[in-house]
Amino acid sequence: MNNQSPDKYNHFFNSLNDAVFIYSFHRKTFIDVNHTACKLLGYTREELLEFSLEDITSDKYKHTVENSISYIKKKKSDIYISELIDKDK
C-alpha cells in the first residue's frame, strides 16, 4: 500500500453524496462517519463517534436495531431501513 492510499480513501469517503456510517458491533459505537452524515444530521464527526446506533434512531424504528444487528452478524449483510434523529430534534 502506498502512502497516498489513506488520503484517496478519505477523499472518496468524504466526497460521497450518501451518508455513510461505519459501525462497530462489538463496541456499539460508530468507527467512522463521512461528511455527508454529519451535514445531514447536524452533528460533528466527534459527536457521532460517541453515539450508538440506538442513540440516533427514532423511537419508531428503535425496536428493529438489535434484530437487524443480529441478522447482519449472521448473514454479513442486510437492507436496513430506519429513521435517524438529527441534532435539532
Image: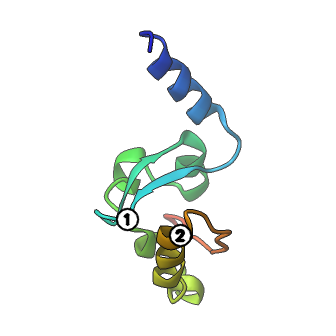
Residues at discs 2 and 1 in contact (Cβ within 8 Å): yes
> Three-letter amino acid code at disc 1?
Phe
- Say which residue appears at 64% left-offset and 32% top-offset: 15
Q: In the rendered image, which residue does mark 2 sit on?
A: 72
Q: Residue 79: x percent and y percent?
A: 68, 69
Which mark identifies residue 25?
A: 1
Question: In which image quadrant can residue 52 be found?
Answer: bottom left
In the rendered image, the residue lying farthest to the front is 74
Q: Is residue 77 above or below residue 34?
A: below
Q: Residue 42: x percent and y percent?
A: 52, 54
Q: In this view of the protein, which residue sits in the foreground, 62 or 73?
A: 73
Is 56 on the left or on the right of 14, as rendered?
Answer: left
Q: How is the image coloured?
A: rainbow
Q: In this view of the protein, which residue sits in the foreground, 39 or 69?
A: 69
Is 51 on the left or on the right of 56, as rendered?
Answer: left
* Residue 53 visible in the displayed image: yes
Which mark identifies residue 60?
A: none
